[in-house]
Amino acid sequence: MELKKNPKANVGRNSSLFFAVGLNVMLLLTYLGLEHKTYDIEAVKIDVLMLEDQFDEDIPITIIDVLPPPPPPQQQVVTEVITIVEDVADVEESVIQSTEIGQDDTIDEREVGIEDVAVEDVEEDIEVPFALIEKVPQFPGCTGNNKELRACFERKIQEHLHKHFKYPEAAAELNIDGKVYVFFLIDKYGNVTKVKSRGPDQLLETEAERIINLLPKMEPGRQRDMNVSVPYSIPINFKLQQQ
């Protein structure tokens, strides 16, 4: 006997359709699962604020008794008494004579001699440059002729600078250096005066003037057998050492 299969009973004839539908359903579920968002629910605490009637406190008014200022002292009234006195004395009027000389006045003619004129000797402060003076100022401890005194003077000045030199701390911190030219005058008494300086900064100028003001008193320079003032200038180089 031959078996016949009903074509409607073929289960696998729509398998591709079922596969496509199932695949789409799975893709849809996967998409919804990935795009699904959840939010944290924060706990909200609700408090009930009960407002009661405010109590108004009556603040007592403080009254400060201030004593009135004392009355001003009574001023004494001075009564002027005017006494009328009869004028019985004759008053002589003073005549003011003019001191100007008129055309009719005569001038006392007298001869004035030379011995009647007082002549005052005025000492002139003569300045002679250091390079042209006959005898340079003598630094303490220097001896010899003018050439030796000049060399000794310059050597003593250099020794004095090295002995008293001190770099200003503020200038070192600010990295300030440079050359300062100092000008001073050795007067006819041997004192160092009129110290002036010119440099890149006030700190360096102040230190240079301090060193020069420490110079000792010297024997003054001489020109034509008389004491004269001698100007002098010297450069002081402030240089920072690079570490």
Image (cartoon, rainbow, N blue to C red):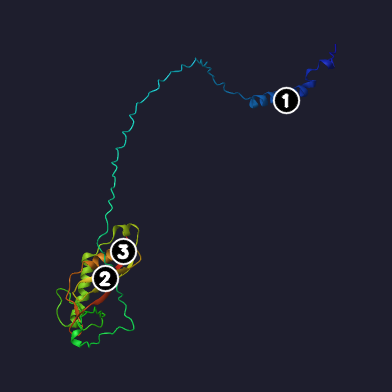
- Residue 94 or residue 85, whichever sits in front: 85
Residue 51 in picture, x, y percent from top left:
51, 16
Residue 240 in picture, x, y percent from top left:
31, 63
Residue 32 in picture, x, y percent from top left:
67, 24
Kindly state the secondary structure of the residue where label 3 is placed.
Answer: helix
Three-letter code for the amino acid on which mark 3 is drawn: Leu
- Residue 77 or residue 230, whichever sits in front: 77
Please give the residue where the numbered disc 3 appears in the rendered image: 204
Please give the residue where the numbered disc 1 appears in the rendered image: 24
Q: Which dot, 1 or 3, sits closer to the camera?
A: 3
Residue 215 in picture, x, y percent from top left:
20, 69
- Image side of residue 196 versus residue 224, left or right: right
Quarter residue 69 falls in? top left
Quadrant where the image shows the C terminus: bottom left
Residue at 78% of width from left, 23% of height from top? 17
Mark with earlier residue (2, 1): 1
Residue at 65% of width from left, 27% of height from top? 35
Quarter residue 128 falls in? bottom left
Quadrant where the image shows the N terminus: top right
Three-letter code for the amino acid on which mark 1 is drawn: Asn
Please give the residue where the numbered disc 2 appears in the rendered image: 194
- Is residue 66 shown above or below 155? above
- Residue 124 or residue 206, whichever sits in front: 124
